[in-house]
Image: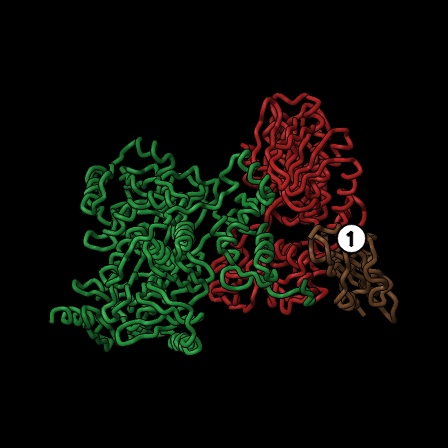
């Protein structure tokens, strides 16, 4: 048994985990990164397109480039990184967290006073959107295909149907188009692509890749290999319109239908889970309901920009510091609640007695021109900020002065108006 | 000639109309900010894209190496850039930023490695 | 002739059609044409119910009958037959056709004796038909009618499982079942039972009728449970449950694990297993089979066992003894995430009388790995290979069974799938020597409770072979035990440490959802897995909530390396996963 004692253990070596470890090391704490996969960098390693880091570095890096900057910094700081190391058990023993992990080097026991979870998210499967038919060879999720094409140089098929009009779907469509797939079609239930306009232009329109809005896949057809899919048009409520079924011949169907936080280990540990985000419930420093256990990045909820995911890691690092130095917490946390026009909101409460302003991330449930993002208590509006545009596909970030929240101990409601 | 450009600089997605006569921009309408103005003019007169793809790499963990153009290249050249990567094979180790193809497809831009590749024990 | 008259009486009811019949040795052959597939099924079932009918071969066609497809299939078989009939693979005492749980069980039972045995399976792996797509329940035997063979073998088979589990080391849990009686149970008869009488019958009469049915079938130990006791046993049971019948014998297994274990043990005891081997015809001398012709060549043999599942009727016909037609009955199952396991302790069902046609026989059950499964449904389908799932059927399952449990996170579905039951029109197991071929044993119509009956079916089949003249001399070297593939999931860290010291691949987790290591995958391949799905059935890699989204490529890479085939050519089940390289650049 290999014993590793640190101030903090970071579970997950993707961008958020790396950022947390870097910041913690910069603050003077000893940290170790534990990563299940073969290398550090997480999902960014397969995201070979550019556009990462515009907020953080002011330039458009590719995924591997963005990851490299953190990996190199981690090396400079001398932080231990354990790849191919998978945490199988977590226990609280005498005030310390003990993580048991397996790796080809043996079984490891990491002991620390704080843990930062940065396990990212997983892709939603076609089962989760109730696609019917069969599941022969040729049915994949977009992330898997991205990895297959960009790291292994292997194609999923010759005629590919892509389901989902978000950023991942569009980016995968462009790669497949450039790397030799003969025929492509993108379908999605919304009236227009849900992803960034930049990607609509540069991934779809630039290459004239065909697409069909208001269309979903009802069934996949094929016994051994995909032979096609039954497409059906949907109305504004995404309900299939009877009689509009159409067979589309193809040999692969790629699903890009959303991401879900990888929170099962935290859930098993007993951390409170938000049914909206399906990630952990956290306080303003992204600490979960388990004291000393923090959650950062896409494990909270999938972010649009890696820059924002990384920001949560920086904030959590400060939280770890507060936890390790035993700073005071409030007797009663102040809840932060989403209003009717907000689909999800993190963090969920303010728990520390003092500290930085509260960084909120929220996803609207409505589309609005020139909206106000407002924060109200029972006594009325405390704060508002304007945006030019709000829509469900866009995560909003709001810096909320701490004092305002502290003046409303019964809680505040954040809404888009 | 009138061209409509959907601005990609921010999520607001302004519809910008650019009028071009005899190769010079006569008017730009509908932009919401300076960035949008600049984007629309470039998009109409000389649209450019960064091309990202992969080449074969021998001796690394994965059989492909992610690469990109060192700067944006004319949109009309994307195909040619990708074609120029056909058959290119590099050997590990590779360093991030290393030039894989110089002056690709005559664009003046180089194709560079996006990441380090360490040699793997077979 | 009494039988013929009875059959004609049934056919007369379909007066618009020109239907005819022919009866040979108790087997009824039906001819003619009807409008719908439903009618085709209905007529077959009605004739099958007539006392004295030993089999129904339904040659009636319906509008939309895929004549062209049938012709193509026969043409293909003929071609493969001609190409391979002259090439001998080997000579065997017994050839078993079909690598489902039935075929593998018979092969393993035969391997106790000094015999040369071959098991032929069409797919690249065993357990790819109905065996992989059922709910894994080992029924006690209360439900089948008293006089049926399936009743007899079910009751016996269920009792034999514990020993099988011990010898073959597959996961087996005797969880028992709880059949709930609720106000919905006799809804259809409510008008005959005014006011309090209805509740009285449900609480104090019906449960004992069920217990009595058990006793009649030879299943003792059923218990009636009422009131708080129900919820002590099953905390989330329907709040309005009035009574329940507890069946202590019911167990759960992973059905494919059972078949894989049987196949491994059979192989260890000398059975030769040929996968990707499709039977296309027989070489015969008079009424005796001399050889089984496949795409690999001819397997010369003295006896043939037809355990071909949904294809058993076609095998029987090829062999020259068509005695039944299979009418495929599809069942859809819905699988839930492991975190739902805490909601369900027993196999649960709600008694509804009469049973609703599309959901009869279905219920809710835990799995040996802590998941929960709902279903199956029951729908007659014309195509034996139709394992497609209609999303509305998933909704039907979710709606129908939600009355069994009061709270259950129904949104945690991780997969749904369909299997096809190999039902005959007599709706019973057909395990008997062929009527018109001397050395062929039918083991057909093995629908539910086929899995539960498998141990008894194997014994019974071997007994039949003995009666047909096969001499059985015990083999002293027979070893009934099989070691499972160890699993990191079930290990304490110290045990893992020990394994990693010996082989570092025990420390490399490939499937994070189900905690499967590279060593387990390599071991599965060593034991014969050749496809991604075969690895999945043996190790559970890809069975978790991401459904292989994260580990599929890793598993495929390991298969590629171990088998020496390029990544794009690695098979899922029967077809390659991927298709070619970027810019054609192979590596």
Identify the hue of chain B.
brown
In the rendered view of the protein, which quadrant contains the C terminus of chain C? bottom right
Please provide percent x and percent y for residue A411.
Answer: 61, 29
Judging depth in this view, the residue of A388 and C11 nearest the camera is C11
Q: Left of A74 or right of it: where is A258?
A: left
In this view, the residue in front, B26 or A193, is A193
Q: Mark 1 — on which chain does it sit?
A: B
Q: Which chain appears green?
A: C
Most distant residue in the front direction: C476
At a point 37% along the width and 52% down the height, the residue shown is C376
Residue A239 x, y percent position in the rendering: 50, 57
Residue at (73, 30) in percent of width and height:
A30
Q: Which residue is mark 1?
A: B93
Q: Quadrant of residue A274?
A: top right
Q: Colour of chain A?
A: red
Quarter holding the N terminus of chain C is bottom left
């Amino acid at each position: 048994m290999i014993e590793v004692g640190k101030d903090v253990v970071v579970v997950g070596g993707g961008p958020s985990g790396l950022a947390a470890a870097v910041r913690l090391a910069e603050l003077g704490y000893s940290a170790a990164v534990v990563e299940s996969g073969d290398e550090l960098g997480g999902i960014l390693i397969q995201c070979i397109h550019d556009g990462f880091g515009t907020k953080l570095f002011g330039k458009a890096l590719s995924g591997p480039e963005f990851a490299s900057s953190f990996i190199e910094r981690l090396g400079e700081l001398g932080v231990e990184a354990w790849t191919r190391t998978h945490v199988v058990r977590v226990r609280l023993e005498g005030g310390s967290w003990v993580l048991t992990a397996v790796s080809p080097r043996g079984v490891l026991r990491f002991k620390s006073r704080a843990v930062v979870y940065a396990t990212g998210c997983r892709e939603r499967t076609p089962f989760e959107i109730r696609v019917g038919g069969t599941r022969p060879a040729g049915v994949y999720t977009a992330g898997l295909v991205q990895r297959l094409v960009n790291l292994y140089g292997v194609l999923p098929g010759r005629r590919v149907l892509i389901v989902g009009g978000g950023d991942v779907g569009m980016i995968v469509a462009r790669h497949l188009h450039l790397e030799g797939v003969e025929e492509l079609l993108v379908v999605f239930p919304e009236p227009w692509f849900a992803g960034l306009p930049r990607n609509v232009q540069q991934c779809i329109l630039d290459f004239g890749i065909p697409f069909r809005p208001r269309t979903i896949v009802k069934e996949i057809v094929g016994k051994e290999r995909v032979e096609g899919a039954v497409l059906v048009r949907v109305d504004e409520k995404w309900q299939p319109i009877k009689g509009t079924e159409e067979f589309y011949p193809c040999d692969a169907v790629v699903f890009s239908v959303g991401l879900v936080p990888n929170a099962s280990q935290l859930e098993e540990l007993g951390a409170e889970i938000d049914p909206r985000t399906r990630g952990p419930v956290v306080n303003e420093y992204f600490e979960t309901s388990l004291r000393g256990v923090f959650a950062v990045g896409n494990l909270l909820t999938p972010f649009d920009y890696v820059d924002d995911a990384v920001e949560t890691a920086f904030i959590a690092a400060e939280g770890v510091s507060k936890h390790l130095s035993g700073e005071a917490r409030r007797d009663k946390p102040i809840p932060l609640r989403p209003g009717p026009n907000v689909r999800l909101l993190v963090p969920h409460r303010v728990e520390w007695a003092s500290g930085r302003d509260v960084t909120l991330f929220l996803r609207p449930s409505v589309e609005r021109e020139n909206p106000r993002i407002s924060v109200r208590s029972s006594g009325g509006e405390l704060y508002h900020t304007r945006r030019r545009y709000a829509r469900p596909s866009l995560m909003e970030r709001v810096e909320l002065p701490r004092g305002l929240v502290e003046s409303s101990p019964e809680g505040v409601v954040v809404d888009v108006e | 000639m009138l061209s409509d450009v959907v601005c990609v600089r921010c999520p607001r997605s302004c519809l910008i109309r650019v009028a071009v006569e005899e190769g010079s921009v006569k008017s730009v309408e509908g932009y919401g900010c300076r960035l949008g103005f600049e984007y629309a003019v470039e998009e109409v007169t000389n649209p450019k894209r960064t091309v990202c793809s992969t080449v074969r790499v021998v001796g690394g963990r994965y059989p492909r190496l992610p690469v990109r153009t060192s700067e944006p290249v004319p949109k009309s050249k994307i195909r040619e850039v990708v074609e120029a990567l056909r058959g290119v094979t590099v050997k590990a180790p590779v360093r991030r930023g290393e030039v894989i193809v110089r002056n690709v497809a005559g664009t003046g831009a180089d194709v560079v490695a996006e990441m380090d590749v360490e040699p793997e024990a077979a | 002739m009494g039988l013929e008259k009875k059959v004609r009486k049934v056919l007369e009811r379909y007066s618009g059609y020109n239907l005819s019949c022919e009866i040979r040795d108790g087997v009824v052959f039906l001819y003619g044409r009807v409008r719908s597939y439903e009618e085709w099924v209905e007529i077959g079932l009605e004739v099958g119910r007539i006392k004295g009918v030993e089999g129904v071969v339904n040659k009636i066609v319906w509008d939309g009958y895929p004549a062209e497809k049938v012709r193509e299939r026969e043409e293909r078989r003929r071609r493969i037959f001609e190409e391979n009939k002259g090439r001998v693979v080997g000579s065997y005492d017994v050839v078993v056709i079909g690598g489902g749980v039935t075929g593998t069980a018979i092969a393993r039972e035969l391997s106790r004796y000094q015999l040369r045995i071959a098991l032929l399976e069409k797919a690249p792996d065993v357990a790819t038909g109905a065996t992989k797509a059922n709910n894994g329940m080992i029924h006690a035997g209360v439900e089948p009618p008293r006089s049926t063979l399936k009743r007899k073998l079910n009751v016996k088979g269920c009792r034999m499982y514990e020993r099988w589990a011990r010898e073959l080391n597959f996961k087996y849990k005797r969880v028992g079942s709880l059949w709930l009686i609720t106000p919905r149970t006799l809804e259809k008869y409510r008008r005959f039972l005014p006011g309090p009488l209805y509740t009285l019958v449900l609480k104090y009469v019906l449960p004992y009728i069920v217990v009595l049915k058990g006793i009649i079938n030879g299943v003792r130990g059923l218990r009636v449970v009422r009131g708080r006791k129900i919820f002590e046993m099953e905390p989330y049971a329907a709040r309005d449950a009035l009574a329940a019948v507890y069946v202590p014998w019911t167990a759960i297994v992973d059905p494919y694990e059972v078949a894989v274990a049987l196949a491994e043990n059979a192989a260890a005891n000398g059975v030769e297993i040929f996968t990707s081997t499709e039977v296309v015809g027989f070489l015969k001398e008079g009424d005796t089979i001399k050889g089984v012709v496949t795409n690999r060549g001819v397997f010369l043999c003295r006896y043939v066992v037809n355990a071909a599942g949904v294809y058993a009727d076609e095998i029987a016909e090829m062999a020259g003894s068509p005695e039944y037609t299979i009418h495929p009955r599809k069942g859809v199952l819905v699988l839930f995430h492991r975190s739902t396991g805490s909601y369900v302790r027993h196999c649960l069902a709600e008694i509804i009388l009469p049973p609703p046609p599309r959901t009869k026989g279905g219920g809710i059950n835990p799995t040996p790995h802590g998941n929960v499964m709902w279903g199956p449904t029951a729908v007659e389908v014309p195509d034996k290979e139709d394992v497609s799932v209609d999303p509305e059927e998933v909704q039907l399952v979710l709606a129908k069974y939600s009355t069994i449990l009061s709270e259950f996170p129904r949104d945690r579905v991780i997969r749904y799938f369909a299997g096809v039951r190999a039902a005959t029109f007599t709706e019973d197991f057909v395990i008997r020597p062929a009527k018109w071929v001397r050395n062929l044993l039918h083991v057909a119509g093995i629908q539910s409770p086929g899995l539960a009956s498998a141990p008894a079916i194997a014994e019974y089949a071997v007994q039949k072979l003995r009666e047909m003249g096969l001499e059985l001399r015990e083999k002293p070297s027979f070893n009934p035990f099989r070691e499972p593939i160890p699993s990191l999931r079930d290990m304490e860290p110290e045990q893992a440490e020990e394994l990693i010291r010996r082989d570092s691949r025990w420390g490399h987790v490939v499937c994070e959802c189900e905690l499967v290591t590279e060593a387990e995958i390599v071991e599965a391949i060593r034991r014969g897995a050749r496809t991604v799905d075969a690895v999945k059935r043996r190790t559970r890699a890809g069975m978790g909530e991401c459904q292989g989204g994260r580990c599929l490529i890793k598993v495929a890479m390991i298969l590629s390396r171990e088998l020496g085939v390029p990544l794009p050519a690695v098979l899922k089940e029967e077809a390659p996963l991927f298709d070619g390289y970027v810019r054609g650049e192979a590596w």
